[in-house]
Image (cartoon, rainbow, N blue to C red):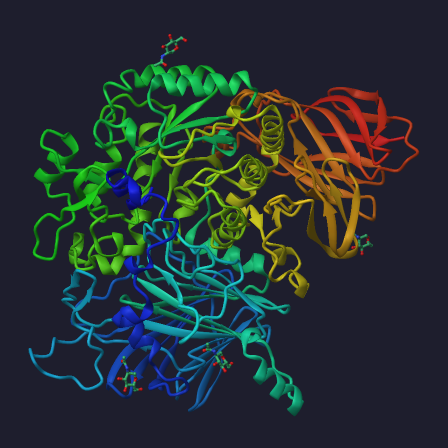
Amino acid sequence: MAVWRFITRILPLVLFVGAVDKGNFKTCDQSSFCRRLRNISIDNSKYVLDLEALKVYDNVVEAQLKNTEADVTFKFSLQALAGDTFRMQVDEIQPLHPRYKVEVALEKDPEPKKIELLDRNNEQVSIKAGNNKVILKSNPFKAEFYENDQIAAIVNSRGLFQIEHLREKPAEGTEVEGQDPGAWEENFKSHQDSKPRGPEAVGVDITFPGALRAYGIPEHADKFALRTTGKGGLEPYRLYNLDVFEYELDSTMAIYGSVPVLYGHGPEHTIGVFWLNSAETWVDINNSKDANVVSSLVNLMSGTKTESRVDVHFMSESGIVDLFILMGPTFGDAIRQYATLTGVAPLPQYNTLGYHQCRWNYNDEEDVKMVIENMDIHDFPVDYIWLDIEYTDGKKYFTWDPIRFPHPLEMQANLTKTGRRLITIIDPHIKRESGYFVHEEALANGYYIKNKDGNVYEGWCWPGSSSYMDVFNPVVQDYFADLYSFERFKGSSDALYIWNDMNEPSVFNGPEITMPKDLLHYGGWEHRHLHNIHSLYTNLITYNGLMKRTPNKRPFTLTRAHFAGTQRYAAIWTGDNAAEWSHLVASIPMCLSEAVAGISFCGADIGGFFHNPDQELLLRWYQAAAWLPFVRAHAHIDTKRREPYLYSEDVQRRIRSALRQRYAHIPLWYTLFWEHSITGDPVIRPLVYHYPKDVNVVDIESQLLIGNSVMARPVTESQATNVNIYFPGGPTEIWYDIEDYRAFTGQGNVNLPVSLDKVPVFYKGGSIIPRKDRPRRASTLMHDDPFTIYVALDSNKSATGTLYVDDYETFGYKNKEFLYIRFDYKDNTLTSTFINKDASYPTKEWIERVVIIGAPKTIKHAKLVSKGLGTVKLETSYINDDKALVIRKPAVSLRETFTISLV
Ligand SMILES: *[C@@H]1O[C@H](CO)[C@@H](O)[C@H](O)[C@H]1NC(C)=O
Ligand SMILES: *[C@@H]1O[C@H](CO)[C@@H](O)[C@H](O)[C@H]1NC(C)=O
Ligand SMILES: *[C@@H]1O[C@H](CO)[C@@H](O)[C@H](O)[C@H]1NC(C)=O
Ligand SMILES: *[C@@H]1O[C@H](CO)[C@@H](O)[C@H](O)[C@H]1NC(C)=O
């Protein structure tokens, strides 16, 4: 929820002005440190690495790095880490104040790796770790990273490296030559930033030779492939968690989340860089493909081959230089290396992958009951119903409105009876009202964030005057986590999960709708040092609170703001989008950017939060959302009701079918989330992830892969009668339409006709996809349902796939209570094996059908062999013009392995 919907309720006339007010947010030129770092001239670095005193230890190289112009020396280290990663750190030797080092974002201390010294002389030192080599150059300082002897990334390639040493404030009235006027104090609109520590910015530039594109650094409402920014052109991509009302598309503006990991991708390799910094950050990108036509012509005339490359420049307001180089070489490797550092999403409950029905607001208990009843009457599956801020007693979190929600426990118990659960919102601002227990306790114990003078900070948010828990204080963390207990959050039960909104944090009357940077946190840190990681602490607290409250159930939290590591605690959504086709289009690249930045559990509000979607847009949105990891409909309080049962029979039928497709595929999503939790592989993937050498896919963002087996191309165009689809993989790759089993090869672009019923989705030949095809009202009611196994054959008539099952909600899997099954099909035989032979689960699930897509046309019947059933003859029949063969009723339990052979 954005600030303006609050204000618009007071001033209804300004509602739906329909565009972001850019004047509320800074440009790089309005920010002193961004101006300073962007103004460094290229190829003129004043940093020199002292190679003589450089020391090479087992896992780390240590040296001194000197700024020869300012005559300040810094400590430099380069560490090799397990999993083909390097970490470069630069900090002051004796800073005037300590510089902020980010905690919590890294899951644990990274494991070191052995370094070997290859060569050293006066100009450079070469070291090796595994297959990777680094050359450190002295003057000017540069660090070149080689993957298998191929240059992959160069740090300080253009000489933009900078670390501003902390210094005493010049006496009042002293002019410091060349100093930016905002270095010691700056104003934005009516807000003043007192900057007690003065300038302390850090920046680094990195070049990816051979790269065609850069991806990552969410969150932006922009393309998946990052665009060229630069002076006089696009603003740099900004990372500063902000509550932006009616955010604009195709924009590098900051919005709610900041994940500072970026990948340079070329056909040879994909290399990642993770800039671990929680201060406001801007990132300039220069992709050589965007260089102007003139220079390409010059190159053409002179016959020189221009090698493609991408240059990036990270600029942060404070902190140390802490840069991880993820050496790939594949996109998947680089993402897994990032996951090794910041962690993975733990396995969610199965039902969180179902459909979530939300609105600001469901008005009262009766409304909640009616919505669920109507969903049942009209046969729409739903697992969660959500309550936005109005459920509280006057915007006091951990309370209920006594008139509208007098029986919260009974309401939750009623929901549970039909297999549903509840989610309520808890925001980090606390209403300053005497008698409100949270406020009184926080005030009495000094738990609130302080302003620069040390008094409790007061800001304006939903409740009006509010203060904010200092989530960086360990005592506050315990206190806040405990508020989620049944004793403290009266009226909550284990059927209730949490939505953390407004945690950028959003402050309606603050600079850029957030906190002043000179507020003081625990440990004496200013808000500027840790702004972007604020939400991570709120999510950690919620996670810990839910774990303490219900230790045997997997917690669920949805968060709006996010940072590196958020995946360990929460799912995200793309915030307050709008009911416009362009916002539907953007939902795919936005979630793909999050997925490659470690946060797979992502979705966008179905229908668009602001404004009213027409029927076609709403329908297409459901159809698209069914193929993203998190599926939730949500709407602004001023929009018309839009629960799916309110539409015509035709629209209802199509939405129902989209949701049923989703529910049928939850076993696939669940298996992918399991695999993500083991390997860090993203659940959804851009085409370039699996087809890195195909230069045609580097900009494709209207299509996505679910795991490696499904490709979706949601229809996101109004009144589409056909859509363009790119089939990757070359002539031997086969893609089967999941509805009629029509086969396409990896032939490139195809124009496919689409009706309103059609969502182009394809199974890749060579995959096996487990499904539960019996429609139910909630996924919780499907736990024991049987599977249909879809076998999509490749050009060699083989296929493989996996299926993970357990009790779908507890931590039993940590005690090996699960089945992780691999299916292989070759030589006309389907075989199942257990991947984890030491795990077991007494599931009631069984296989009711096998569908073999692309099966030979001469099959008479099938034969099942298993220990429990012996040898059984099975009926088969062809469907869809013989495009697929159905094997009926194998009726074999998942608890035993089997083979099914075609005869
Ligand atoms: C930019 O750098 C030049 C010198 O390279 C300097 O003269 C100028 O004052 C700087 N501008 C700002 C805004 O810092
Ligand atoms: C991008 O880099 C090229 C050289 O590779 C340079 O000519 C161009 O000016 C740069 N563009 C921007 C916007 O900085
Ligand atoms: C719970 O369900 C019962 C039975 O339908 C109903 O009478 C009661 O009003 C419901 N309670 C709430 C809070 O919805
Ligand atoms: C089919 O088998 C051949 C030979 O083993 C192999 O090279 C090829 O990659 C396989 N094709 C597919 C689509 O897996």
Quarter of the C terminus within the rendering: top right
* Quadrant of res 797: top right
Q: Position of residue 792 (x, y in %)?
A: 76, 40
> Quick one: 51 or 214, which is closer to the camera?
214
- Against 465, residue 176 (above or below) is below
**Going 76% across and 54% down the picture, which residue do you hit?**
746
Q: Is residue 108 visible?
A: no
| Residue 357 to residue 712: above or below | above
Q: Residue 687, can we see it?
A: yes
* Residue 24 location (% of width, % of height): 28, 57
Most foreground residue, 26 or 308:
26
Q: Residue at x 12, y 53 (%)?
A: 451
> Which residue is more in the foreground, 526 or 611?
611
Q: Which quarter of the picture shows residue 70?
A: bottom left
Percent coordinates x, y for residue 586 in the rendering? 51, 51
Q: In the drawing, does residue 274 fall left or right of residue 265?
A: left
Q: Quadrant of ligand 1?
A: bottom left
25 on left or right of 592: left
Residue 103 in the figure: left or right of residue 120: left
Q: Which residue shows up at 40% across the image and 56% down it?
A: 259
